[in-house]
Structure formats: C-alpha cells, structure tokens
C-alpha cells in the first residue's frame, strides 16, 4: 500500500469557519488535533460530521489549502446528502477526518512547464500545486486555466488571481474571460502559442470536462494527468468500491482495475481507460 | 479486560474486522492500537482471480450502504506469494476467508490456508449475494453440510462458517454447519437488496442488486444471532451493523461471543479502537466481565415470537 495511507490518521477536527463561496459552495476550515504529515497537492481527505448523524460513509474532498500546520481548508460544492450535512455544521462542531489520502500530483520540477485545467470545484487540488510551483520559482511556467458555467462559479477566484502566475478564465455564458468551455480555450491558447505544448497538462473537474479533455489530449499527444472522482466507500484502500479501468500493459500492471483512492486519484492519462 | 475465547482461540478482544471491509492484507492495521482487535478477518480469496463487478459498486441509503463488489481479488496464487508471508508478524491472529463456485473450490482454499503458518482460522464465505451461485450453500442445509464436511476433513485449523441472512429460517442451517464440524458461525453476511434511481429507471449499482450492510441491518442480524446461538453449542460471531460498544454488548447478550465490525470502519478506520476503549470503560463502570454477558437475553415470558 502506498506510503500516503500508512501516514494517514483518523481524528476529530473542529470546524473553525464555514464561508459561502459562490452560489452553491463553501470554504470549510478545520482545525485538527494532530498536524498531518506533509502531503502532495491533490491528496484528499474523507470527511463526515463528527458526532453521528449524516451519512453512513464519509465523502472525499481534495485538501484545498493548508492554512497552517493544523488547519486545513476545503472547497465544497453542495450536491447531495453528504455535502448538505457538512455544510450545515456550525463553527465549533466536530468533523471526522481521515487525511492525507491518495497520491496527489507529483509537483513538476522548476524548468518544466505545467498547465492546470480546472473546472468548477476541480480547482481544489491546484491552489496548493500552484503554491509549490511558485515557491520553487516556477511561477512564469505555471499556467492556470479556470472554467465554469458562469463567473460566480469561478469559486474563490481571487485566491488564484493573487498568485503570481499566468491565469485564464473561461465561462460557458461568457460572463468572465473566454466565452466557451475549457477545451475550446485550450485549443485557442495552443493555436496562438500562448501555452507550451510540451508542458504537463493536469486536469480536474466534472466528468464531462475530463472526458473532453482526455479526448483532446490524446488527439494532440499531450502529456496529461487527471485527478478523477469515483464513488468511494472507505477512501483508504480496503473496500474495492472505487475502481477505474486500467490500460492493459500500462504502468499500473495487468490488473484491469486501479483503486482511485490509493492508486489515484491522480492518474497519467496513458495509464487508464477513460 | 477484553480477552475473549472463541473455541480454541484466545483473542485479545471480542472485536474483529469483517471480511471485505478492512482490506486484502494487513496494511490498515496501522489505524488500530495493538490489543484492541481480536482478529483480522481478511477479504474473501477465491482459487482464481476475480475482476469483480461493474461500477458503481457501493451506494448509500439512509441507514446503510449497498455493495456489489463481486469478490474482486487476485486469487490464491497471488495471495500465497504476496499476502501470506506478511501475516505471521502482524501481532494479531489472522482469519483467511475462502470463496468459490463449488465444494471443490472451498476444499482447495481450505487446504491451501491450512498450510500457511500466518493463518489462525479459516472463515468460509458461503453467503455472498453478489456472485452467481454465491448463496447456494447457505440456503440448503444438505449442500451446506456437504461443503463444510469436506472442508473440515481438510484442516485442523479453526473453521468458521459465515451464514446468509437471506433464508426463511437460520436454525437448521446453523445446526447443519455445527454437525458438519464447524468451530464457529459468523452470523451474518449482507442482505440481498435493490436500490433504484427512478429518474434513469436504472438500478443504482452497476450490477443491479447488491448486499445491504450498516446500521439498518443490525436488528435483523441481532435476531439471527439470537436464533442461531439458541440452536447450536459452538460460538456465534455477530456481523451486521455494529458501530458502538453498546451495539457490541447487545450482540453479546443476544448470544454472540465476538462481533465483527465492517461498514463502520469506512467512516472511521480506527473505530475498532474507539469501541474497545468504550467497552473497557463500560465494563469497569458497571463492574462486569464480557463472558458474563454472552447469551443473557431475558425474553419476556408473556410474549411469543
Ligand atoms: C478524490 C476526490 C476529491 C474530491 N474533491 C472534491 C472537492 O475538493 N470539492 C468538492 O466539492 N467535491 C470534491 N469531490 C466530489 C465529492 O466527493 C462529491 O461531490 C460528494 O461525495 C457528493 O456527496 P453528496 O452526498 O453530497 O452527494 P450524493 O448524494 O452522493 O450525490 C449527489 C449527486 O452527484 C452524483 N454523484 C456523486 N458522486 C458521484 C461520483 N463519484 N460519480 C458520479 N456521480 C456522482 C450522484 O449520483 C447524485 O446525483 C471529490 C471527489 C473525489 C473522489
Ligand atoms: C464493501 C463490502 C465488501 C464485503 N466483502 C465481503 C467479502 O468479500 N466476504 C465476506 O464474507 N463478506 C463480505 N462483506 C460482508 C461483511 O463482511 C459483513 O458481513 C457485512 O457487511 C455486515 O456487517 P457490517 O454491517 O458491520 O458491515 C462485505 C461487505 C461490504 C460492505
Ligand atoms: S474507496 Fe475503498 S478501496 Fe477505494
């Protein structure tokens, strides 16, 4: 089992703050009792209300930001029962957390350009990724493409705008930045040589976006990595509820499935059937 | 304080993991304090690798989850090479769980596990609702007795038989397993169920039907533990919805000698350590010992059931 799971701890955290973000999302800040070890951007946590109630199983969320040693921030879009319960908590409430889980993105070394493609709350793994790149002096080589249905769903846009890196937005309704979807924006930027085609392209977002991105990346021969979402039972590798089909004879071996929670959630596009 | 005897086995605690909910290998033990877990029951292994069912494989409903994993596992050869060598040094007895298509498969698995020094006991999964033929042995007392006898003849290790809740009466099956030589019964596996998404008109699980587990099944599991423990002399191990020390004590009162904690581990991987701490506290506060609890249900005399 990957090292990330061996270092994961389960504990009760205290809800520090819950701030509305856009029409349907929240920033959820937790203060943990025990500081988690270092983790890669794109690593995730399993969260559930701490004192019973709510769903039977926890829900996975990328760590959005590490505010300090013991405080973690999450960006959570309210969809169904699990996210509704979490976002109905109030400061001081307990939250059950298991963290850090999953592989996360391997941060590309300075000198190697990176293009991040984020749809909606798919931005979550990229704030920390961008911070790492900037800390390594690679800001100019780190491109952030942020897309959503409309401007108000470019969640917490200012946090990214405050970072010193090239950023482009796209909205389906044209209310901010490029009028169109992220794949159209990518096409446009590549054609105008505004993006380095030899970069690592890292994507996270809704399934529709990831499929369109995967098709595009394969057609262009881009080096691509995806952070994927599946239903999860445990998040730490014991239940086999999170299978992703693997590419036969690919780097993940001959078994037809990988577990998204421990083998992922970040996969090289060439290693999976997606 | 939590020491538990299960036939010939001496366990540090009555709390066990449940097959398929704590992994294929000992890695997740890192979440637990030593001494809290009585035995590590691992995921079902079959003679040949199984790729499992189409996703989604687990979905939730109020009170529980439904799964149709389909016994995904890498098969006996892989297990023998990659898993078995790790077991002897984990510091807790390990229970290997055997699956198969036919009686000969079960016998083959039991023979193989029997030769592995790290395996303390063998649990027969005769009750998986998620594979074709998964429950044929657990619904027919004659077929059940046949497969258990075959396996009994193949091992001197402790042999546990995991029964299905999807039967009209559990007592005849419990007795058949006991007479065929089982050392303990695990009661019970998941309940066959179906969840639908009316918008798409489709089942919510990729494989259609699935098995229910979690808090919602606890009343049913409790009744089956009670009925089967009344029917046999061998120990009964409860499995179905346990989440807390109170749930564990309820199961003991119903007649269980030990309790497997499955679905609850998903939400809190260290839940078994939390339950163990609570159990110690409750026993100390109440001045009770675990073995005083087992099978002490006081049935109301005026009520028939
Ligand atoms: C590794 C990982 C990281 C994630 N990070 C974030 C994050 O940072 N922020 C964030 O907001 N969300 C994130 N998600 C998604 C988040 O886990 C889900 O939105 C959440 O579990 C939904 O739970 P719910 O109970 O509110 O909704 P549910 O009631 O479970 O579902 C609501 C609706 O969404 C559908 N749905 C939910 N999950 C899936 C799925 N996996 N595949 C297909 N359909 C699905 C359901 O069918 C339903 O229609 C992440 C997921 C993974 C796997
Ligand atoms: C995801 C999942 C996988 C399971 N896999 C197995 C298995 O491989 N073999 C088995 O005997 N039981 C399996 N079970 C059943 C459990 O061991 C247990 O009997 C059942 O879930 C009821 O207990 P619980 O409510 O505590 O989970 C599985 C259950 C779940 C939820
Ligand atoms: S969610 Fe349980 S194995 Fe991945």
Image (tube, coloured by chain):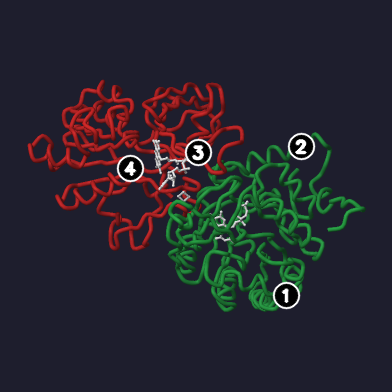
Chain colours: A red, B green
User: Which x, y percent locates residue B112?
Assistant: 55, 71
Closer mark to the observer between disc 4 and disc 1: 4
Please report the residue visible at 46 percent of the width from the left and 57 percent of the height from the top: B202
What residue is disc 3 on? A82
Task: Check chain identity for marks 3 and 4: say if they share one.
Answer: yes
Query: In 3D space, how far apart are the residues under numbered discs 2 and 4 (Cα atoms)?
Result: 47 Å
Taking the view exactly as shown, the residue that stands out farthest to the right is: B302
Q: Earlier in the sequence, mark 2 or mark 1?
A: 1
Q: Which residue is mark 1?
A: B180
- Whether residue B20 is situated above or below residue B138 in the rendered picture: above
Residue that label 4 marks: A206
Question: How many tags in the picture?
Answer: 4
Which numbered marker is on residue B282?
Answer: 2
Label 3, label 4: how many angstroms apart (C-alpha)?
Answer: 18 Å
Real-space Cα separation, disc 1 to disc 3, in angstroms:
46 Å
Q: Secondary structure at mark 4?
A: loop
Asked if disc 3 is less than 8 Å from ligand 1, the answer is yes
Q: Quadrant of residue B226?
A: bottom right
Examine the image and state in which quarter residue B105 appears.
bottom right
Could you tell me if residue A156 is visible in this image? yes
Real-space Cα separation, disc 4 to disc 1, in angstroms:
54 Å
Are the numbered discs 2 and 4 placed on the same chain, yes or no? no
The answer to whether A17 is drawn above or below residue A95 in the figure is above
Residue at 45% x, 62% y: name it: B53
- Assign a secondary structure to mark 2: helix
Quadrant including the C terminus of chain A: bottom left
Q: CA distance from mark 2 to mark 3?
A: 32 Å
């Amino acid at each position: 089992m990957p090292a990330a799971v061996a270092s994961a701890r389960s504990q009760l955290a205290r809800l520090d703050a819950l701030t509305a973000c856009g029409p349907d999302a929240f920033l959820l800040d937790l203060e943990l009792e025990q500081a988690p070890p270092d983790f890669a951007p794109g690593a995730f946590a399993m969260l559930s209300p701490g004192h019973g109630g709510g769903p039977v199983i926890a829900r996975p969320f990328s760590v959005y930001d590490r505010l300090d040693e013991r405080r973690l921030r999450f960006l959570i879009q309210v969809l169904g029962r699990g996210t509704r319960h979490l976002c109905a908590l109030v400061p001081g409430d307990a939250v059950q957390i298991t963290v850090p889980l999953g592989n996360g993105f391997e941060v590309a070394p300075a000198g190697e350009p990176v293009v991040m493609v984020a749809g909606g709350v798919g931005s979550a793994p990229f704030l920390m990724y961008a911070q790492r790149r900037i800390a390594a002096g690679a800001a100019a080589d780190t491109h952030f493409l942020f897309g959503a249905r409309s401007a108000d769903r470019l969640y917490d846009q200012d946090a990214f705008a405050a970072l010193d890196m090239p950023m482009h937005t796209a909205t389906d309704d044209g209310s901010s930045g490029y009028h169109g979807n992220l794949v159209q924006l990518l096409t446009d930027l590549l054609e105008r040589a505004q993006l380095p085609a030899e970069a690592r392209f890292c994507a996270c977002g809704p399934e529709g976006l990831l499929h369109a991105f995967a098709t595009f990346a394969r057609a262009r021969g881009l080096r691509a990595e995806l952070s994927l979402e599946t239903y999860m039972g445990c998040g730490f590798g014991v239940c086999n509820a999170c299978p992703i089909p693997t590419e036969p004879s690919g780097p993940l071996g001959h078994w037809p499935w990988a577990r998204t929670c421990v083998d992922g959630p970040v996969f090289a596009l060439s290693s999976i059937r997606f | 304080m939590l020491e538990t005897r299960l036939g010939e086995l001496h366990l540090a605690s009555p709390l066990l993991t449940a097959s398929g909910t704590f992994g294929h290998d000992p890695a997740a033990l890192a979440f637990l304090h030593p001494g809290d877990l009585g035995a590590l029951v691992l995921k079902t292994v079959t003679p040949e690798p199984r790729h499992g069912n189409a996703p989604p494989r687990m979905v939730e409903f109020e009170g529980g989850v439904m799964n149709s994993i389909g016994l995904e596992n890498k098969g006996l050869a892989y297990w023998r090479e990659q898993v078995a060598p790790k077991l002897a040094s984990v510091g807790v007895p390990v229970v290997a769980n055997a699956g198969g298509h036919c009686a000969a498969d079960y016998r083959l698995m039991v023979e193989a596990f029997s030769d592995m020094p790290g395996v303390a006991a063998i649990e027969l999964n005769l009750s998986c609702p998620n594979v074709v033929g998964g429950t044929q042995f657990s619904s027919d007392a004659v077929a059940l007795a046949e497969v258990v006898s075959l396996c009994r003849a193949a091992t001197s290790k402790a042999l546990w038989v995991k029964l299905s809740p999807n039967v009209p009466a559990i007592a005849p099956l419990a007795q058949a397993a006991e007479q065929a030589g089982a050392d303990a019964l695990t009661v019970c596996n998941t309940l066959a169920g179906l969840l639908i998404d009316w918008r798409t008109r489709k089942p919510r699980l990729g494989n259609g039907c699935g098995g229910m587990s979690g808090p919602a099944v606890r009343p049913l599991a409790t009744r089956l533990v009670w009925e089967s423990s009344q029917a046999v002399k061998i120990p009964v191990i409860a499995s179905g919805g346990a989440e807390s020390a109170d749930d564990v004590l309820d199961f003991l009162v119903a007649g269980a000698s030990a309790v497997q904690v499955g679905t609850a581990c998903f939400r809190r991987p260290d839940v078994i350590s939390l339950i163990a701490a609570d159990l110690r506290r409750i026993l100390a506060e109440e001045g009770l010992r675990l073995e005083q609890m087992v099978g002490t249900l006081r049935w109301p005399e005026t009520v028939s059931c």
